[in-house]
Image (cartoon, rainbow, N blue to C red):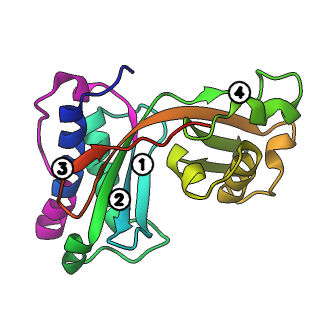
């Protein structure tokens, strides 16, 4: 992917917030061309909304695979995180000043269950603070972003198990043949306060 510039990251976070504001005002998706050509390339992306100052999750939706131009993925994910996350009620206009916006730009998922001799070795190739995870089995699928494992202080085995739970499967599904396990990395940019300064989020790797 190549590291995004700070200017590109700032633009994406502001684009996500503008997309939510525009949808609240018009009921339509924002139409906008990005000033940075690279943002027209296809990447996976997630938009996360957190309450401020509590830092509690308020919505998170995205695209694991690079199926859309990045800027379009951010527009759609921002609106979906605000209004279509089934875990939360739709965002109200008066909440706009009480949430922070975070954008994660993903590398393509890399399958790893077929890279180890034993599935017991999977935790060894999952790096906390670097990798996010996807597990898939039949109709079941779950994804957790890299920052989630850091926020909950999980180790690699716990991270794998929690991704199985997110998928609606048993906690040790990652150990079972037939379950596909993928890892990916993410570049993360976030607001420090609602509509405020935007920084690159450094997770720290262990």
Whole-number angstrom distance, CA of label 4 to CA of label 2: 29 Å
Few, some or many C-alpha atoms within 10 Å of disc 3 (few <14, some 14-19, many ≥20)? some
Q: Is residue 56 above or below residue 10?
A: below
Q: Secondary structure at mark 4?
A: loop
Q: Identify the residue at image location x=12%, y=46%.
A: 31
**Earlier-in-chain disc, 1 versus 3:** 3
Q: Secondary structure at mark 3?
A: helix
Whole-number angstrom distance, CA of label 1 to CA of label 3: 16 Å
Q: Which residue is mark 1?
A: 62
Q: Are marks 4 and 1 in contact (CB under 8 Å)?
A: no
- Percent across and percent down for residue 2 are 36, 19
Q: Which residue is mark 2?
A: 80
Q: Identify which residue, 59 or 131, lies in the foreground.
A: 131
Q: Is residue 155 above or below residue 101?
A: above
Whole-number angstrom distance, CA of label 3 to CA of label 2: 16 Å
| Relative side of 85 to 30, left or right | right
- Percent across and percent down for residue 13 are 24, 48
């Amino acid at each position: 992917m190549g590291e995004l510039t700070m200017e590109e990251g700032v633009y994406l976070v502001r684009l996500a917030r503008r997309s939510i504001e525009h949808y609240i005002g018009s009921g339509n998706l924002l139409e906008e061309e990005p000033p940075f050509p690279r943002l027209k390339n296809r990447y996976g992306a997630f938009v996360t909304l957190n309450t401020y100052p509590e830092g509690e999750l308020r919505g998170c939706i995205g695209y694991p695979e690079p199926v859309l131009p990045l800027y379009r993925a951010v527009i759609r994910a921002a609106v979906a995180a605000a209004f279509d996350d089934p875990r939360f009620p739709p965002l109200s206009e008066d909440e706009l000043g009480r949430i922070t916006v975070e954008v994660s730009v993903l590398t393509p998922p890399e399958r790893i269950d077929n890279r180890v001799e034993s599935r017991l070795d999977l935790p060894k190739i999952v790096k906390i603070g670097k990798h996010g995870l996807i597990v898939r089995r039949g109709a079941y699928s779950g994804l957790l972003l890299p920052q989630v494992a850091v926020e909950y202080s999980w180790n690699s085995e716990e991270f794998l198990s929690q991704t199985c739970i997110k998928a609606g499967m048993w906690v040790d599904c990652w150990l079972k043949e037939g379950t596909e396990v993928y890892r990916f990395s993410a570049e993360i940019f976030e607001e420090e306060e609602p509509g405020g300064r935007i920084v690159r989020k450094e997770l720290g790797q262990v």
